[in-house]
Image (cartoon, grey):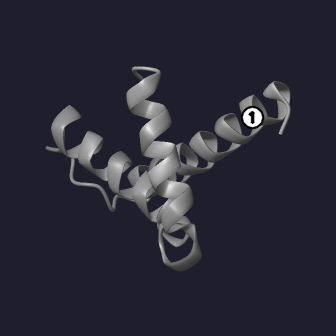
Amino acid sequence: MTSEEQKQFVFKLCTTIARSIVAQIDDGKIPEDWNGIELRWLIAERANDACYGDIAGSFRLRRRRYNNILRINSL
């Protein structure tokens, strides 16, 4: 992926997650007393759900390499 494609991918994924949560807020499915703590948890869970399939099976080596890059580059 080019850096531009990477940026587009990140933007699209984050936008999709945000729109889904906002739609649930609009539908009254998210409790009004939830503040930044619960909403952060929800966002994190949705992001985790979006990538869950990439962790399983044949992607384990790729995940280890990814974690190594995070450590090496202090990301």
The residue sitting at 31% across, 52% down in the picture is 42
**Residue 2 figure quarter:** top right
Quarter of the image where the N terminus is located: top right
Above/below status of 57 relative to 16: below
Crowdedness near tag 1: few (<14), some (14–19) or many (≥20) residues, C-alpha within 10 Å: few
Q: In this view, does 42 lie to the left or right of 25?
A: left
| Label 1 sits on residue | 6
Quarter of the image where the C terminus is located: top left
The residue sitting at 21% across, 53% down in the picture is 31
Q: Could you say whether the residue bearing mark 1 is in a helix, strand or loop?
A: helix
Amino acid bearing label 1: Gln
The residue sitting at 25% across, 48% down in the picture is 41
- Toward the bottom, the furthest residue is 57
Between 59 and 31, the one nearer to me in the picture: 59
Between 57 and 29, the one nearer to me in the picture: 57
Q: In this view, does 68 lie to the left or right of 7?
A: left
Give percent across and percent down for residue 19: 57, 47
Give percent across and percent down for residue 44: 34, 48
Above/below status of 21 relative to 57: above
- Toward the top, the furthest residue is 74
Q: In this view, does 30 lie to the left or right of 3?
A: left
